[in-house]
Each structure stands twice: as C-alpha cells, then as structure tokens.
Amino acid sequence: MSSPSARGAVSPRAAIGMIAVAAAAAFLATFNETFLNVALTPIMHGFGVDVATVQWLATGYLLVAAVFVPVSNILYRRFPTRGLFVAVVALMVIGSVIGALAPSFGVLLAGRLLQAIGTGLLTPIGMNITLAVAPREKLGTAMGVMAAMTTLGPSLAIVVSGALLSITPWTTLMWVFGALALAVLIAGAVLLRTVVDLGRPHLDLLSFALVAVGLVGLLYGISTVFGGSALIAGLSALVGVVALGAFALRQGRIAAPLLDLRPFRSAPFVLGVVMTMLGLLFVFAMNVVIPLFLQSAKGQSPLGASLLLAPGILATVVLGPVAGRLFDRHGGRVMIPAGFAVMAVFALLVGLAAGHESVLLLGALYVPAVLATALVVGPSQTFGLSHLEREISGHGVTVVSTSFQIAGCLGTSLAVGVYGALTTLGLEGGQTADQAATTGFRGAAVLVAVASLLGVVLAIAATRASRRARAASAATTADDSAAARTEGTVAALMKSEVFSLAAEDSVLDALRMFTSRGISGAPVLAADGSLAGFLSDGDVMRYLSAEHPRSASIHSFALPESDDLAKAFDDLVELPVMRLATREVVTVRADASIAETVSLLADQHLKKVPVLDAASGDVVGIVNRSAVNRLALSHHLERHRSPATV
C-alpha cells in the first residue's frame, strides 16, 4: 500500500538538482573511506596505539559500512526520501564531531564507525534517487556523473588530507569532513523529495544478523590475510561464506526478504557488478600503494605524493560524464573492454617507471591508467543495472553498493599485502630498502594489471550475455504478441483471413474477387508484401460514374449486359488496381485498443481498415465497423443478462 507521499512527476530541473545531491552524497561517502588513512601515523603517536590497533579506523569503517548497505533498501522504501537522507548524513556529522573531540582512541573509533553507518546507507540511497529520476535514455550520463564522484572521492581525499596534514593537526580532518557533510545535508533538505512509492517493508533481524556475520567474516579474512594469522584469516573468511550462504537460502524462504536475490538471475547484471568491482579495485589499490611507495622509496612528502595523483584524478572527473554519454549512444561493447585494456597496459608501465629516478614519469603514466577507469566503472555499473526490471532495481543498487565496500577492502588489502610481502622478500634477499620497495610496488602493479585483463575477458562475455538476454526477451515478446489477441485489443476483433490483391491485378480481377468472397474491399500488396494501397467497390463505382455514366448505377450489374456495360468491363480489364486504389491507407496496429479503433473509424468515416503487425508492419487482418457493433451489442446484452440465465 502506497504512502500519501508516493512519488509523482519530477520536472527536469528538479531531477537535475536531485541527481546533483545524489552525486554529492556518492562523493561524500567514498571521500571519507580514505580521508583519514593518511593520518594514521599521527593518530598512533597521539593516542599511543600500535599499527594493529590503528588500522581498525580503516578496516572497521569498511566492515560496518558494508553491513549496513543491505538495510538501506528497507529504509529507502519505508521513509520519505528527504527525511531519511537528512538523518543519514546527520550521523556522519555527529560522528565527525565525536571524532574531532575524542579524548581516547576508543571514542575516536566509535565516531568513525558512526560515520561508517552513514556511508553504508548513503551510497545506495543516492544511487536509488538517481535511478528514480534520471530519464532512461540518459541513465548512462547520470550514472557516469555518479561514477566520477565515486572515483573522485577516495582519490581526492588523499590529496586534500595530505595538504591539510602538512599545516594542521589530524583533528582538522574530522572538522573539515563534518563541514562537508553539513553542506550536503542542507542541500538534501532543500532539493530532495520522495521519489518512491512508500510502504512498510519488514526488517528481518535474522537476515540482518546473517549478512552482518557473512560480510564481516569475509572482509575481515581478506583484510588480515597478509598481516596476521593465515589460519584465523581463512577461518574468518569461511565463516563469512557459510553465513552468506545461509543468508541467501533464507531470502528465498521468507515473505519479506532483506535482499531480493532476483537480480542474480541476470547474467549481464552479475557481470556488470564484477566489472565495476574490478574497476574500483584498481582505483583503491593504486591510490594506496603509489603514495606508500613514493614516501618510502622516493622520499616524497605526503603532500608531494598526493599532488602527483591530482592530474589523473581531475581528468577522471571530467571524463566520467563524457563516458556516460558515450554509453548512452553506443553502449559498452567497445568502451568497457578498451578501458580495461588501457588500465592493464599502463599499470605495467607505471610498475616499470617505478625504477626510474624521476617520479614525474610515474605520475604521467598514471594519468591514462586512472582515466581508463572512467570508461569502466560508470558504464559497467549502468550496464548491469539497465538489465534489471524497475521493480527490482533497488535491490540491484544494494548489491552494487555492497560491492563498492568489498572492492575497497579487496583493493586496499591485496595491494598493500602484495607490496609488503614482496618488499620483505626483497630485503631478505639482500636488496636495498629502495630496491625492495620497488619490487613490492611492481608486484602490486602486476596484480592490478592481471585483474584488468580479467576485466577484458568479462567485458567480452558481458556483451555476449547481453545479446542472449535481448534475444530471449525478443522471443518472449514475440510469443506474447502472438498470444496477445485478448479482449480489449484490435486483435480480438479483426478478421485474420485476409483476401488481398496484387499491385499488378486489374480492377476486373478485383471485382471478381469481391463477388466470389462476398467482400466490399481489399488491401493491395506490393511485390515485397508491403501494403501499397486499398481498393473498395466504392472506388470502382466512382470511376465508372466519371468514365461510363450510363453504367454507373449499381443496378446495371444486375441487368442483362448492355453495350455500355460491356465497354465498361473491357475498360476495367486493362485498368490496374493501383490506378483506383487509395494509396494513403489508414491502418491500425494489432496491439491498438478497441477504443482507439472506434475513434479511428468514426473520425475517418471508414467502414473497415487493414490491421498491421506492430513489429513487422505486415497486414495481418481487417477490422470493420460491423465487428465493433457486434462487440458493443454483446457487452450490452452481457450486462443486462437475467440472473436466472446465468
């Protein structure tokens, strides 16, 4: 049952404002994922904690954000969009204030996790808003903007935090983020409106517990596989997989699932999600290992390392919407695999440049590498979601948003893990610190290059899957069309046995057919089967009236043959039907409503019209006024039928 605040029409201007707020939300959520990472060292010194403890500001953030993503779809469909958005962003503001004023590490972590709850809810809410208000034909452009903000967030965070930390204490980061969140909160309060039909969806607590255990176990296992006990990491991941399996089974057995799993039945959607994750994995991996390598091996300051990434980041923001428009026009058949290929090639080149003395070469080669992610992340995301029906698109958004957190955790953990492991092996093998760091960096570059090559393969598979899906949809549509002769359409009324004339037939041939078939007119078909015209007995009589006045009366055909009538018929033998046929034929589609057909017959003062197949344009029947009259009469008699006769 819908709420009184269910969505209505959204003007183009209002839609632009709402998409802008959604894009700002996407930026805010992903910006905060890496904004505090550069400050981990001063936080360790300030609170006297070790690396294993301080890393929970990053790992715990990703875990909590991932857990709350599935809940967002329930809240989005239950509460008014504006109020929900404001409340979620308010959590991030409050968390920032708590973190900035934290007297201990525990309080700081609590504020950080409160921000994470907001992030987990905010990203899918913003995407749902975009899907709801963006025109279908411009969805790629809108999602390109969202993808640009998603890519810009974690990348720009490193630059901004590096600049701020060079002149201010780390607590400034919390105040700055709080101010950004407050600005987005105000924009949402002004511009947003409810864009979904509201109801009272139920939150299944057991499902929430299972997905929480599943995601925490899986992501914790991934994030600790290189930096802790391999046994504990493996067991944690195993528990996560088992819990997620139990979650999936439960969703199919309860009336109100936390997450509708129907999107996973679509192969193009699943491939689109995986390709999006691979693109984001590249972004998160490179954005963490490049500053790490530049600071440890090249002697760069945090600000210098961050600024080296800035050109590529800014260019990616510009290219994101452009890539979206290209996807709207041409699809992703070429763009997505090409983007992955460029990512793979330039990731390897960046790895090779790591051994060069100049860091500018590395920075220059990184620009096309990160630019290529704009051709992948947004288009892949749009590709996957565009293959879902609107009724389950919200659940698709939840899956995509959850994949963001998984991709972030994978990219960060795997890249840092490979970097650290190979660096250690290099040191143990007798390499200098700089040489070992270069080896580690090149290993991370190879990792993302391999992931990008996998993306090329998946992009080709996605194109094939999309073609199969379209073919299956077309076949279903054709079957439905063939079976669509149901009450309420022209197909229910038309006479499907069509007696037609060929364009080369004579008018006399037409009259013979009219007489033998008991009809008063017929469509004229061209050699290729297309409709060329329509000839009626009225067209013939008007011709005879003009050319043979004495045989123009219809009664002439019932009287013994006269010389005038014989001359008229001789004339008709030589006269092709297209000389008399109406060329601008009024037609009706087989899927048109009966109401449309009645209006057409009345407005055009016609007794009958040809019926064309909606897809091919072939003549499939004739509908006439008498059929409409019979239908009206039968409906009238049905309504007034005596109960005793039922």
Image (spheres, helix red, strand yellow):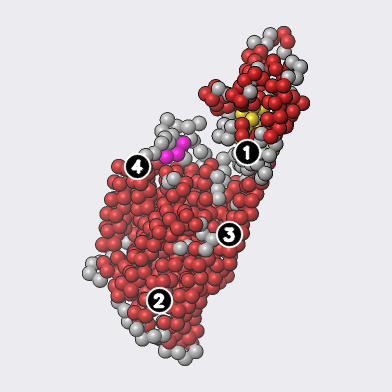
Report, in whole angstroms, how far the alpha carbon at label 4 lies from the one at label 3: 34 Å
Q: CA distance from mark 2 to mark 4?
A: 40 Å
Which is in the foreground here, disc 1 or disc 2?
1
Residue at far front of view: 563
Q: Earlier in the sequence, mark 4 or mark 3?
A: 4
Do labels 2 and 4 touch, CB within 8 Å? no
- Magenta residues, as a range? 193-197
Residue located 36% across and 86% down the image? 357
**Mark number, residue 365:** 2
In this rendering, the label closer to the viewer, 4 or 3: 3
- Mark 2 and mark 3 lie on one chain; the one further toward the N terminus is 2
Q: Nearer the viewer, residue 373 or 41?
A: 373
* Front label number (2 vs 3): 3
Q: Quadrant of residue 307?
A: bottom left
The answer to whether 180 is drawn above or below residue 189 in the figure is below
Considering the numbered disc 2 on the image, is that residue within a helix, a strand or a loop?
helix
Disc assigned to residue 463: 3
The residue at which mark 4 appears reads as 14
The residue type indicated by label 2 comes to Leu
In the picture, measured across the screen, residue 393 lies left or right of residue 162, that is right
Q: Secondary structure at mark 1?
A: strand
Sequence-first tag of 1 and 2: 2
Q: Spatial distance from mark 1 to mark 4, Cα to Cα? A: 46 Å
Q: Position of residue 16 (x, y in %)?
A: 35, 46
Query: Which badge, 2 or 4, comes first in the chain's sequence?
Result: 4
Determine crowd level at label 2: few under 14, some 14-19, many 20+ residues with C-alpha closer than 10 A: some
Q: Amino acid at mark 3?
A: Thr
